[in-house]
Image: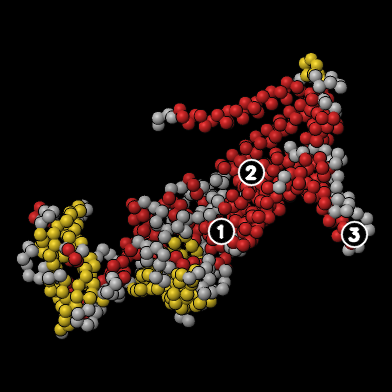
Amino acid sequence: MKRQPFFYWFTVPAVVLALAFLASMGAIIQYSFRKHIPGSLDVGPVTLENFERLAHPLYFSVYLDTLLLSLYTSVFTLVLGYPLAYVMVRARSRWIKSTVLIVSIVPLFTGEIVRTYAWLNVLGHNGFINSLLLGTGLLDRPLQMMFTPFGVTVALVHFSMPIMVVILAAAISHIDTDYEKAAASLSANPIKVFWKVTLPLSTPGIVSGFVTIFAWTLSAFATPQLIGGGKVNMVSNIVYQLGFASFNFPFAAVLSLLAVMLTIVLLLVIYASTRRLEKMSLH
Amino acid sequence: MADDIAVRLDRVTKRFGSVTAVSEVSLQVRRGEFLTLLGPSGCGKTTLLNLVAGFLEPDQGEVYIGETRVTQVPPFQRDFGMVFQNYALFPHMDVFENIAFGLRMRKVPKGEIQSRVEEALDIVRLGGYGARHARELSGGQQQRVALARAIVIRPQVLLLDEPLSALDKNLRARMQVELKEIQRRVGITTIFVTHDQGEALSLSDRIAVISEGKIQQLSSPDEAYRNPENSFVASFIGDINRIPARLVEVSGDEVAIAVGEARIRVPKARCHASRAGDPVWLFVRPEVLEPVPEDTENAILGTIYAHVYQGAHIEIHVEAGALGTIHLRTRDDGVMARWPVGARVGLVGDLGGAMVFPRDSRD
């Protein structure tokens, strides 16, 4: 085929973006090797002591908490999102389809902060849930949900749901219903059809949904900041505190770098396992 | 009901919105029989198959499999096997697991599953292929796995939804022979859906020709070919010329028909129109007609328009004015030289097997 140089110009935006990312990554790497000078935005000479600070158990626990929160969030988003996606794709009634679509997708169009504030009104001491439980006399003291990992997870699950539903719906809609009919013709009841055919065939969607939400939650900031209120800290929150409260850019850079590495390792592991799934001939 | 009936449809109607896909169809499929539902796309044949399978529920009428009324029974509780157009082999299982699936769902003991799957693989001549994956198999092999998967559960009826249409021509011919042979050997009642009249003629014990949601004719392939009951069946089965004509008179055992200038006699038994003067269709097979000089008495006149060489035979297209294009078929190679393109020609033939059907004025 004849080359058409004209088309190369379409890559310009991608190149500009890539350069911007490279520059910021370069800045972060550069900062991570410089000495922090307390009380100053300037940085000192080259040093490795920022990396040595990572050994402190405090940071280990922040990473562990972040990983656990990401894990819970992806698991709950998956478990709650799958039925929604399934109904959205397979329901016969268009009315049900559009309702589910609207309910799952609309949160995407409200900002992260707005959504998080909405959860403050639901989870807070005077929020919807506590008013209901206190008002009906089921509780005599308000339930502590704000500033807990539970509250943060609930808000993160809600935040991640649209993406999960879209990814799963795409995967489920690619499953030919003839497979399900074939299973039914072989005496599989609807529950068996789901477990033996539909669910295994949606594995690619489940994997990519899980990974996307995991990676996306790993870098969550506003939700843990507002709902966690300093009591539940994820990596981004610590980076923010170090960078903008103590102006310790070098150590903030080290923490960010580690988070990026973690995400890359995670994606590689998932990529390898999806390749294995593909070899099992799951499209 | 008689126990030699494997599937019975009783005045079944199915509508989709304002479209009636199947209209008051009654049909009995005999045990062990190979019955074909034949018709053009959209005629309702696939809907009928889905009504038997239970993927659709009729608006009216009843469906029986064996002695059991299954009209409201969901597919997984009905006793049938099915081969889908795209085979629908489970991509996440190997050949063995695909075939074993139905046995596992039916809670067949483990040891028996092993032997029955192997037996089924032998029947479709794929012994030793159990560990393969579906996508490693050729189209014909996938087809056979799908067939093995459907018959291994020993269902009362086997449903085939255009299973040969995805194969290329040579393979399709081979699979036709094999399918029929396996069906006869296993002795399984089979309902086969196709739009390909050649397939229907070569495979079936009986053919139900379907059009507009109704069975137009239910008969042996031979009957459908020789004695079509209406003009739809006549034009759908086998290659045939449909020539506009007029019924002139009915006398004794014969009727006289005016085809253009020609006056043609057809046995009365072959004529489904009754009144002199009626517009009719004359149906003539292309192999019946032969070219003669145009001054021959009572020949249909036309001009040679094209020769189509087909190897075993030659098709000659004759342009016959208001009568349209008439095809004739001959094995005589000399015809092309004797009747070159553009030559005026007369057509005659033994019309003892021709058919005459009434023609609507709108046709």
Q: Is there any visible trace of residue A205 in the rendered image?
A: yes
For the residue carrying disc 3, how many other residues have a C-alpha within 10 Å: few (<14), some (14-19), or many (20+)?
A: some
Regarding mark 3 in the picture, which secondary structure is present there?
Answer: helix
Residue that appears at 40% across and 67% down:
B43
Task: Mark 3 vs mark 2: give the one in front.
Answer: 3
As drawn, the label of residue A134 is 3
Picture quadrant of residue A181: bottom right
**Residue B77 placed where, x, y %?**
57, 68
Compare residues B20 and B34 and report the one nearer the observer: B20
Q: Separation of disc 3 and disc 2 at Cα?
A: 41 Å
Residue that appears at 89% across and 52% down:
A125
As drawn, the label of residue A180 is 1
Q: Is there any visible trace of residue B109 in the rendered image?
A: no
Q: Which amino acid does label 1 sit on?
A: Glu
Compare residues A109 and A22 and report the one nearer the observer: A109
Q: Which amino acid does label 3 sit on?
A: Leu
Residue that appears at 35% across and 73% down:
B216
Q: Against A152, is B84 above or below?
A: below
Task: Mark 1 vs mark 2: give the one in front.
Answer: 2
Q: Callout 3: residue from which chain?
A: A
For the residue carrying disc 2, how many other residues have a C-alpha within 10 Å: few (<14), some (14-19), or many (20+)?
A: some
Regarding mark 1 in the picture, which secondary structure is present there?
Answer: helix
Regarding mark 2 in the picture, which secondary structure is present there?
Answer: helix
Q: Separation of disc 1 and disc 2 at Cα?
A: 23 Å
